[in-house]
Amino acid sequence: MKVHFDELFSVHNGAVQPKTPVHINGVTMTPGVSFGGGVSFGGVDLTKYIGKYLEVEKLPNGVYDVKGFYN
């Protein structure tokens, strides 16, 4: 399903923090984790996708698995 970045992440002073558990390329991050630009999470710099859309699958355990990004 297609979701907006803001549905899964919050941004404060350029730092990205998940609002819900998110899985990217084999790595899961949970709320409370925060990182800024240039930091790769699961091989992805999420700050490049602020304000854009993501393709995700919601897993049975409630974790959002990010499958891709829309430009």
Image (tube, helix red, strand yellow):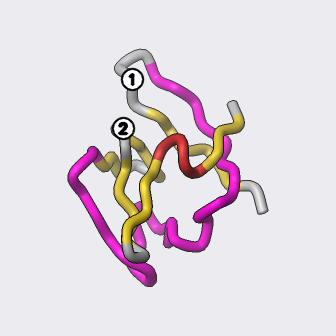
> According to the image, label 1 marks what residue?
62
Residue 57, image quadrant: top right
> Would residue 10 be found to the left or right of residue 32 on screen?
right
> Would residue 24 be found to the left or right of residue 51 on screen?
left
Of labels 1 and 2, the one closer to you: 2
Please state which amino acid type lies under the numbered disc 1: Gly
Q: Residue sitting at 65 percent across and 48 percent down? A: 54
Circle 2 SS class: loop
Estimate the x, y position of residue 50 in percent, counting from the top left.
Answer: 59, 64
Circle 1 SS class: loop
Q: Are marks 1 and 2 in contact (CB under 8 Å)?
A: yes
First of labels 1, 2 by sequence position: 2
> Would residue 47 be found to the left or right of residue 55 on screen?
left
Query: What kind of secondary structure does the magenta stretch mostly adopt?
Result: loop
* Quadrant (top left/top right/bottom left/bottom right) for the C terminus: bottom right
Of 35 and 13, nearer the camera is: 13
Task: Specify start and end residues of the magenta stretch as a single range.
Answer: 30-59
Q: Residue sitting at 35 percent across and 20 percent down? A: 61
Q: How many marks?
A: 2
Q: Residue furthest left?
A: 32
Q: Is residue 12 above or below residue 19?
A: below
Q: Which mark is residue 20?
A: 2
Q: Residue sitting at 27 percent across and 45 percent down? A: 30
